Image (spheres, rainbow, N blue to C red):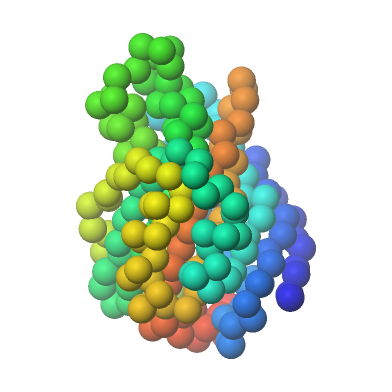
Amino acid sequence: MTERITDCSVSQPKRITEVENLAPSEGVDLEIFLELGSIGAGHAATSLSEVFGEQISMDVPKIYTLPPHRVPSFYGRHDVPTTAIYMELRGEADCDILLLFEMEEAKKIASAMTFMPIEELDAETEASAIEELGNIVIGSFLTALADFTGADLVPNPPQRANDSFDAILDTFLIKQLLTTDMAILFDTRFKRADGNISGILMMFPSKKLQNILTEKAKDWV
């Protein structure tokens, strides 16, 4: 196991404290993921502050890298009702990104974004708010990834799913197990004046994108 600890100080109050490599990979520098997480969180915090009409900070307290097949058992949330936004990135190199929230957390997000009490939310309004947040957060990490690698990454329209944690991942990972040997998990925390909202952002870079990251890291270091 490899573990590195660093603090990142930027304009938006956020912090990435630790990255753990639970399946040592050849050539990919873990510091890259710290950098991507910091930049992506900064972009997301700025955009979300405008949407929420208040200052939002986004912390990424921990990042993990591990094989895709280990992801469901890693979190142990098997039957927890979950909302997910999934986006495919295509172009020079492929990368799939999944953003997950427990359903109760998703309701908090929708309530805050629409300025409506949770009990007054209808399914369509809630879905629209979660999709908007997914677009912002995933888009922010996409921008960070594209800027760092210089790769032309084109996002497909996002897809949303509501199901148990394992059911969502089982469907999603069928493809990932054939196309990549790496999952990058960003624990995320959105901080507002009246409380925090937690989620998980999962990134599955294709082997080609991993190679690009490795080459770019040589120049970056």
Does 26 sit above or below residue 163?
below
Front-lying residue, 87 or 45: 87
Using the rendered view, name the quadrant where residue 189 is placed: top right
Front-lying residue, 60 or 49: 60
Q: Quadrant of the N terminus?
A: bottom right
Using the rendered view, name the quadrant where residue 195 is placed: top right
Does 31 sit above or below residue 216?
above
Using the rendered view, name the quadrant where residue 207 is placed: bottom left
Residue 160 located left or right of residue 48: left
| Residue 24 in picture, x, y percent from top left | 64, 81
Question: What residue do we see at 58% from left, 71% from top?
Answer: 66
Question: What residue do we see at 65% from left, 40% from top?
Answer: 13
Q: Quadrant of the C terminus?
A: bottom right
Question: What residue do we see at 50% from left, 41% from top?
Answer: 80
| Residue 86 in picture, x, y percent from top left | 34, 53
Front-lying residue, 59 or 177: 177
Question: What residue do we see at 77% from left, 63% from top?
Answer: 5
